[in-house]
Each structure stands twice: as structure tokens, then as C-alpha cells.
Amino acid sequence: MGFNTEAATYFDRMAQMLELTGADRFRVNAHAKAARVLGDITTDLGPLAKDGDTKALTELDGIGKGTASKLIELAQSGTIEEHDELVSKVPQGLMDVLQVQGLGPKTVKLMWDEKGVESIADLKKIIEDGSILELPRMGQKTVDNIKASIEFMESSGSRLHIGVAQYVADWFVKLLENTKGTKRVAYAGSLRRGKETIGDVDILIATSDPDAARDAFTNGDHVTQILANGETKCSIRFSTGLDSGRWGGDEGSMGVQVDLRLIDESSWGAALMYFTGSKEHNVRLRERALSMGLTLNEYGLYKEDKDDDTPPQQRGEKPVAAKTEESIYTKLKLPYIEPTLREDRGEMDLTEAPDLVTVDDIKAELHSHTTSSDGKMELEETATIAKKRGFHTLAITDHSRSSAVANGLSEERLRQQIKYIKAFNKGFDGIEVLCGSEVDILVDGSLDYDDDLLHELQVVVASPHAGLRAKPKDATKRLLKAIQHPLVHIIGHPTGRLIERRPGLEPDMDELIAAAIEHDVALEINAHWMRLDLRDTHVRAAVEAGCKIAIDCDVHHPDDYDNLRFGVLTGQRGWLTKDLCVNTWSKAKLHTWLKSKR
Ligand code: DGT
Ligand code: CA
Ligand code: CA
Ligand code: ZN
């Protein structure tokens, strides 16, 4: 993560804590504004701050002297004193309470001041004994909503979003790659399999200097606790120090567990395979090995010796295969099975590797926002990034008029934007920029613009944004109506879920998939790691039926293009092949499909 994001997170938290401690409006707003500004700035302020360049910093829009000096403090010392002081005043359990959907800082402060609530547990108590109703403006309906939000948060447990786990894993892999003696290092476990949430991060290393690896691993900047420090396994807790809402909640403050396993290079493939899992896949592999007169463990694949119980690696037995995963799969007479498929969901029956979609195959982004609605980039900036990524097509799909909080475009503004984009596209080489819209699917299933206007758009992404607590039956009806609309290309984040935060709609997926095929509509995998919507199992059902899928980053910010990897992993977990993923198509093929709906 960049310095700007880190700094924005600090300011966000400071604003929240200031509000909780009853600081004056002006100070709270100043910090909140700084967080917003930092989140929006697209040049990296890290180097300027490190150099203590107050002048250059304050020349930027929205950054005053006060903010600049805190940025410099953060870059140079790694923290901000004002932040740390607030942390000592505000019970950190209260920050968890802030994460409950539907609770703002004002209400949380009231609960703290008047009811002594300092944690989710305290909040549950005042709900249970009914005393929460004594708070001003608190009705039974609000309480029921708060209760449901807590239940949802708790039932989804304390797993990490893949976006956070990936950040932690990349950080450690880089650290260890630069450590003396390292021969190989990689992450394994559920993260390598691309699951949407991760229990802990598993890292493997082969090194000629185990002490150096252990030292680097356990003495890292953000290590808060050492759980184990042994010959073959170390285990630590790591705090990202980044636990605001934009990181999806309380992960940073709880700490992330990271396991490091020290592996012999000669058994790298076997170990990588074992620690990548899943457990269920490993069980299937071992069964298969046994049926072939072989035994498989984390050291290698060996000939079975029925008369000797000693593990083969201890007998000094030479493995049949161990160095690479590929060699082991080959000896087991299987095609190479991608980590994303290793879930015991039928992958053992594969006779050849499926032509799964990869990040490099993606050539088009069909869902992106600009400053015209709630995006942070002007058209030219986002088009330049998309072009640099080697995309042939970028669709601009700002929000429609009903998304008022997202500054949705009125019909008139959209008409102007269409003209503007067309003119821009004429003068901008190397990528085709298309006019589109992310049109709200209203609660009754109708779309937010009339057909004449939709007809002028080259790409229509129709998405549900409000009314996400609807009954499954109503959700199905609503989404079906949008799919049947002849001018719609893609259904954006079809369920509207937020992972670990909000369940979203629960429509009958099979019905939606059948209708999408009939009406030649693509269902989206929204690649943001908070969404991943469709989810892997939905993708699998869609792929099996032959439904088109779009993988889109729902770009608001330059960093969002990097979320593509998570969308692709989710697609792979749904066995998504290139042919069904519209973003992999050639320009001619994609544009022909888009035009077929006009
Ligand atoms: P997570 O961390 O809950 O998201 O899921 P995983 O799959 O990363 O599980 P984890 O961290 O417990 O272990 C990593 C892999 O190591 C797991 O996928 C398979 C392998 N593994 C770990 N412990 C065992 C075990 O007791 N038996 C077997 N068969 N495999 C294990
Ligand atoms: Ca794990
Ligand atoms: Ca683990
Ligand atoms: Zn949306």
C-alpha cells in the first residue's frame, strides 16, 4: 500500500477518535477532509514527506500546514503523536463498535458517554437489557437493525479479506527475498488458492541461512507478538496498523497471524503442494497415490513400502517426485491443477488443464467511474492507466441519477458526458474509450434512465445499489427484469454483498443465469476484494451453464486496477475459461457483442 493510503487511514482514524472524544466540529472536519484529500491525490506523497518538503506539500490542493507537518512526522517517524495520544484515550473496542453497519460516531459517542459502552460485548448487553432504548432518537427498528448487523459480523468470524492478506503476504515475501541465504520463498494456503477470506497467511522458505530468515521474520517492523520460533516453523502476529473502514474493519487491530515454514529445497514442490491445500484436495491426492502404490507427504511422493512404517524420507528413500508440483501431478497421472481449483470440487477428474482466465488475458475494463460521479480520476488519467495496462477498451460507466450520494449524473449531464467522451476518444490513441453508465436497477427492477438515453450508450452496466435487504423472491424478480431489458450488457455486482459486512441480495442464481444466457447478458465478477460479487460458487454455476462473465475492477481510484488479480482468482475458482470471459475477447469480438444490443 502506498504512503497516501496509509496517511489517509491515519487521518480517518484520528477524525473518528476526535469525534468520539468530543473534539470540536472544526477539528474533526479538518481531519476527515485531510483523509479524503489524501485518498484522492494520485501522486505519491511519500518522498516529499520523507524529505520534509513542507512547501511542495502545501502547494497541493487541500493540504494545509498542519496536515503537511503530520505527513512529514508520519513519513519520518512511522507514526503521528496526535494519533497515538488519541489511541490512549479511546477504548479500541469502541472502534469495532463503529464498524457496525448503521452506527455513526455520534451514536457511538452517546453510547460510550451515557451507557459506558466500550466494546461490541457492552453494546450487546445494552441491547439485551433494553437500556439502549433510553438513548435519544433510538427506536426498536434501529435496534433490530443494529442487532442484525452484529449477528452478521459475528457469524462471519474473524477471517481476513483477501486484499488485506495479500498485502501482508507480499510484504513478507519481499522482506524474505531480500534476506541473506534465501533460495526460494512463496506464500501458500488459502491465499494461494485465492479464497475470498483468509484465516492465516502461510509462507514457505528454502534458505541456506535459517537464522537470518527467522530473525528477519520475527523482528519485522509490524510484528506485535511471536507465537512460535522453532527450527521448522515460526509464527507471529502482524499488525498492519491500518484498521479503518477502508480496510474492511478491525483486521489490523486484531493482528494477522503469519506462519513461516522452513523447507528443504529438494522437497520444495511437495511442501508447496502440502501447505497450499486444501486439506480436502490433499486427502484426495494421498488416496490417489496409495491406489498407485505410492505415498505422498510434505517431503515428496515415494514408492510405498508396506512392510516398513518409518516415514520414507527418514528411511533415506529417494522420492519419485518432490522438487516441483508439476512433477508430482505428472507422476500421479494428473494434469497440473492450478491452486485455485484445489478444493475437491471435481478437479481430480480433470484429464487436461482447463484454459482458465489469467490476469494477462484481460484486455478490457467495462466498469469505471470518473470525477463526473464518485471516481477520483479525470477521464484522461484513467484512460492512460488502462492503455498502459495493454487494454484495448475502457468503458466509462459513471453512476446514474438515483445514486445521489455517489453524485449520479442527471440525464442532461450524461448527454454532455457522451459528447465529451466521444470527442476525447477521437483525439486519444491506443485505446477505445466507450460511453457507458452504471445504471441503478431500481427496487421494482426498472432502470434509472429511459430507453432513448440508454440506447445512446455503448455499454450499460445495470447494478443494484439500494434495497439490498429485499426478500429472495423479490430480488430474483428485480434482477430478472434488468436482465430481460434489451439494452443491458452487464449486471454489475449482482448481489450487492460486502464480504463480512453485508449479506446482500439472495436471488435464485440458477434463474438469473438461465435468463442471462437467453438474453445474452454477462454477469459481473466485481473484482474489488470487499465485493467479489459474483462469488466463486456462483461463477461456477454460471460457467457450467455457459453464461458470459465480465471481470471488472469498478475503478474509482488508480489503485483499483490492481484489484484485477482478485477478480481473476475468483473467476478461476469458478473454473472460468477465457472463452466465456468477455474482457479477454479481441476488440472486434467484444465490440460486435456490445453493438448487437443496439
Ligand atoms: P485458512 O488459513 O483457514 O484460510 O485455510 P488454509 O487452507 O490456509 O489452512 P491452514 O493455514 O490451516 O493450512 C495451510 C495448508 O496446510 C492447508 O490448506 C493444508 C495444509 N495443512 C495444514 N495442517 C494440516 C493438517 O493437519 N492436515 C492436512 N492434511 N493438511 C494440513
Ligand atoms: Ca492459512
Ligand atoms: Ca497456517
Ligand atoms: Zn456499483
Image (cartoon, helix red, strand yellow):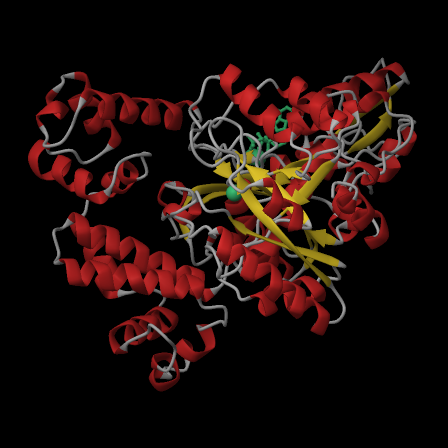
The quadrant where ligand 1 appears is top right
> Would residue 331 be found to the left or right of residue 393 on screen?
right
Q: Report x, y in % for residue 527.
A: 60, 44
Q: Is residue 142 above or below residue 508?
A: below
Please state if 562 lies on the left or on the right of 427 as rendered: left
Residue at the location (15% across, 42% down)?
109
Report x, y in % for residue 110: 12, 38
* Percent x, y of residue 542: 72, 26
Q: Report the residue at 75% width, 71% height from top.
A: 429
- Position of residue 323 relative to residue 207, above or below, is above
Residue 343 visible in image: no
- Residue drawn at (48%, 38%) of the image: 160
For the question of whether residue 199 can be seen, the reply is yes
Foreground residue among 188 and 296: 188
Tally the numbered discs.
0
Residue 310, by quadrant, is: top right
In the figure, is residue 83 to the left or right of 448?
left
Front residue of 294 and 19 = 19
Residue 33: x and y, percent?
Answer: 30, 62
| Residue ID at (28%, 27%) | 146
Left or right: residue 474 versus residue 587 is: left
In the rendered view of the protein, which quadrant contains the C terminus? top right
Q: Quadrant of residue 394?
A: bottom right
* Position above or below: 112 against 283: below
Tell which residue pokes out farthest to the front in this image.
452
Which residue is outermost to the bottom?
55
